[in-house]
Image (tube, rainbow, N blue to C red):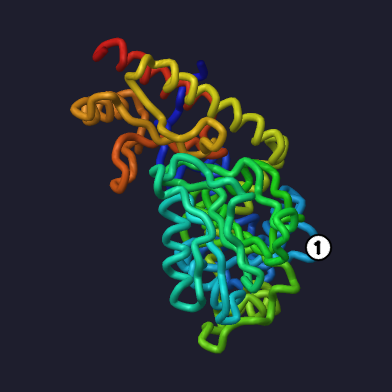
Amino acid sequence: MPEASRPYNFSAGPATLPEPVLRRAAQEMLDWHGSGMGVMEMSHRGREFVSIAEAAEADLRHLLGVPAQFRILFMQGGGLAENAIVPMNLSRGGQVDAVVTGAWSQKSAREARRYADVQVAASNEADGHTTLPTAAGWRLRKGAAYVHVCSNETIHGVEFHQLPDLSALGCDAPLVVDCSSHVLSRPMDWSRVGLAFAGAQKNIGPAGLTLVFVREDLLGHALPICPSAFDYRTVADNGSMFNTPPTYAIYIAGLVFQWIAAEGGVTALEARNIAKARLLYDAIDGSGGFYANRVAVDCRSRMNVPFFLHDERLNEPFLARARERGLLQLKGHKSVGGMRASIYNAMPLHGVQALVDHLRDFARSHG
């Protein structure tokens, strides 16, 4: 196994970044490409930063194969803000159907109720958010302005491995996808999407940047109460420069996009992510009950792996020994407890192997 130069950070977000990206950012901190300025010092309207933003958007569009009829917006506020911004732009004050599969989609539905008539079309709450409700059983209304899903639940570790095809369900509403925690970990089927959004701090870059991919026909319908800076039409018409964008976060995201391309693109990363997830789940499942993941096998997240020790009194010793081995941020979300390993694109396979070695060693010494 390659020698680790840094500890392995399994945080759910803000999360680990590729080491080559961090090193390049450090090299360019004081002087970007001979400009005499660091990126944080640049005018967002100056030619230097405009070139950074344009390259980042072009690279992102290429990596995900985003069709020309979708606009890519660089916004602020994270996924939580989009829970309000989306209904302010798309609901027209009418009906919204939401599929609740965990903590984040619950928050989305609750926030959207401030602006629209929200119905929970399906929920997995009864089984503790450990399965996914079959799309054929969703209760979708004919008049809904859109249908909201969270395609990967960071806290509960549930993932849609394929996006639902609403047209096959007889629904003509656009699908809105919160893909914050697995964006760029796999290809996106844009034929099934009306709008997708993602906070960058999980799988792309630092906190402060939110990506929005919105089909052009969905622009221009914002409610009167929608702030101008959050009106998708205004943001699109101004090239994401209506207000000062999160410039440094865009720059880091752009470096990450270049890193992904150098690693073989999204398809190559998806194969790597499948291998990492399989390695970790196999270790948990093969522990003889010492560890447990409670999510149904067919909808386990490749990015966020919650697991539990059979004896909760071992939680702190497990975490302490993990820190000694350079394995950081493994404590589960406070709402569910246990452990959670987030293995985003930037987590190398040997980082997951190091975690698996710890799982096995700890089980042997405490079994």
In the rendered image, the vertical position of residue 287 relative to residue 78, given as above or below: above
Q: Quadrant of residue 69?
A: bottom right
Q: Residue at x 57, y 79 (%)?
A: 94
In the rendered image, the vertical position of residue 343 relative to residue 233, given as above or below: above
- What is the residue that sits farthest to the right in this orientation? 68
- Residue 24 percent coordinates (x, y): 57, 45
In the rendered image, the vertical position of residue 131 relative to residue 83, given as above or below: above
| Element carrying mark 1 | loop
Quarter of the picture containing the C terminus is top left
- Residue 132 percent coordinates (x, y): 53, 44
Mark 1: give few (<14), some (14-19) or many (20+) Cα within 10 Å.
few
- Residue 316 percent coordinates (x, y): 22, 30
In the image: residue 35, left or right of residue 359: right
Give 24 or 99, whichever is nearer the viewer. 99
Q: Residue at x 67, y 79 (%)?
A: 233
Q: Amino acid at mark 1?
A: Ala
Q: Residue at x 72, y 48 (%)?
A: 63
Q: Which residue is mark 1?
A: 68
